[in-house]
Amino acid sequence: MEPNTTTKGKGKYFKVDINEASVLDIFSIYFSKKIVRGTRERNIISFHPNVNKKILERPGILSASVLVQLCFKLIEQLFSGVGSRFEDLINIMFNDNIFTQLLINKLQGKLPVLDKESESYVSAIGCLDKRVDLDINPDNSKYFPLLSALASKVVYENKNFVKAAVEGQWKMELLGSYDFYNDDHGSNTTQAMIFHDKHANPDRIIVAFRGTEPFDANAWCTDFDISWLSFPEFGKIHYGFMKALGLQEGDSWPQHIDNDDNPHCQSMIEKLSSLCCGKDEQPLPEIVQAKEGQNLYAYYTIRKVLRKMLNKNTKTKFIVTGHSLGGALAVLFPAVLAFHNEDSILEKLEAVYTFGQPRVGNSSFGRYMKKKFKEFGVTYNRYVYNNDIVPRVPLDNSVLMFRHFGNCFLYDSHYFYKEITGHLHEHYFMRLLFTYMKMSWDAFRKMAEGLRRPKRESLPLLVIRFAAIWFPWSAFVDHNPQDYINSVRFGRVRPGEEN
């Protein structure tokens, strides 16, 4: 039996921990010379002795990261409450099923209470456009990218909505909709769903990670955290993303965290079950729900489900996808599989599709992943829509050194795309006035187009676009999943630029 705590060596690290931080510490970080000399400041900042000192010489970046995270922590409860009331309001205003049910309850003398777990109730993201129609056939080249984009949107919703979409509309098998534990947050803040598409030949399993919810303060703290961890095997990676995927205590990736996850133990269980139940009876069921007192971690649980499903049919392939933070986790998942030498699973990985994905690691990580994707024949497509700010962070400057890698399909507001590699809009933050003017014009044009082509734009999305004309938040409006769905569905090369 393999040891339960097999790990490979951890390298350098840089961590920002705001649990003990106060507002005064922000000024202390900005002005303190102790940090520049490489000592710890009230346990807020810790780092490897041989870390690149450039980041220590830029206290503005450190203090800004702490400030934003601290603000989100301070308003966490308020932020969640406002978000909950906002989602209730937009469901009542724009969701006909919810409004009708409330009206019926009122006429019947019942208390008009919203059921947030109803398949009709949608999140703030879902309210921007409730459509989840998969209107193309599996033989279409856009089928799996579109299915992945739709899955990246549906995974934001409650479990009943997910079940209705996957099984009711797409006629596929839902294997699981999960809430995974994040040690950093001390709660289940990572979500993912797994479903089986039997319409295609060969059949596919889709793993979709949820991105950042608009009113989840912990998720925003993860996005703005500039902490990172370096492994000698695959370079420097964003620390918050790794914790969301299931990084264990001691900042390690054990090969297995319990016997249920160990294929050697599982094989023994199945043999014992066969002896107890008889050869023609079913073996003991695979456990993919948390036992009492046990937390589910994203990487280990999903790997376990995939191993079980892929062993059933040698021709089955799988795809990993996600939007925003979910896109980052979609890239990290195969990275940890490679880290653990899970070749039998990686051989079945067909593609990784990400939408609005932030930068995950440095250039060493990029080289490692390109090598592994090439070795196992994995397609990696990263989709970026227009002025979306999220793919431009964390910064790729000489201090943070985060880098994208692989193929990028960059779409403009007309859904024309071009395939690029390397840097993405290097001067995005330097030309703020020009960027803002372009954002406002794009928002105006998209609103006009939405009025002309209502099938592409919902009323709530039109309202958001109208507000974006006057306020500098179009960079976040362009991050919404619906524009990524439209990009895949309607995207085309600009005339005259075809190969």
Image (cartoon, helix red, strand yellow):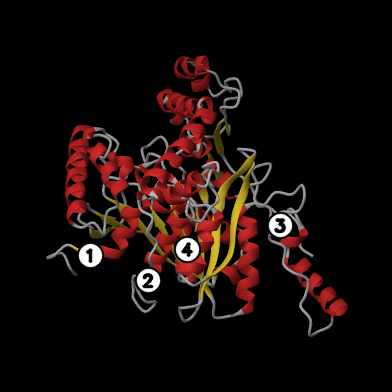
Mark 1 lies on residue:
492
Crowd tier of the residue under label 4, counting other residues whose Cα lies within 10 Å: few below 14, some 14–19, many 20 or above: many
Instruction: Look at 48% across and 19% down and name the residue there.
Output: 26
Q: Secondary structure at mark 2?
A: helix
Q: Which of pointers 1 and 4 lies earlier in the amino acid sequence?
A: 4
Quadrant of the drawing holding the C terminus = bottom left
Mark 4 lies on residue:
165
Displayed quadrant of residue 149: bottom left
- Can you tell which mark lies on residue 296? none
Residue 399 shows up from this direction: yes
Nearest the viewer among 84 and 257 is 84
Instruction: Look at 61% across and 60% down and name the residue there.
Output: 302
Q: Amino acid at mark 3?
A: His
Q: Which of pointers 3 and 2 lies earlier in the amino acid sequence?
A: 2
Question: How far is disc 1 from disc 3 in space, using C-alphas?
Answer: 44 Å
Mark 2 touches mark 4? (CB < 8 Å): no
Quadrant of the drawing holding the N terminus = bottom right
Q: Amino acid at mark 1?
A: Arg
Mark 2 lies on residue:
143
Q: Which of pointers 3 and 4 lies earlier in the amino acid sequence?
A: 4
Q: Nearer the viewer, mark 2 or mark 4?
A: 4
Mark 3 touches mark 4? (CB < 8 Å): no
Crowd tier of the residue under label 1, counting other residues whose Cα lies within 10 Å: few below 14, some 14–19, many 20 or above: some
**Residue 486 in the image: x percent, y percent?**
30, 59
Q: Nearer the viewer, mark 1 or mark 4?
A: 4
**Residue 297 in the image: x percent, y percent?**
64, 51
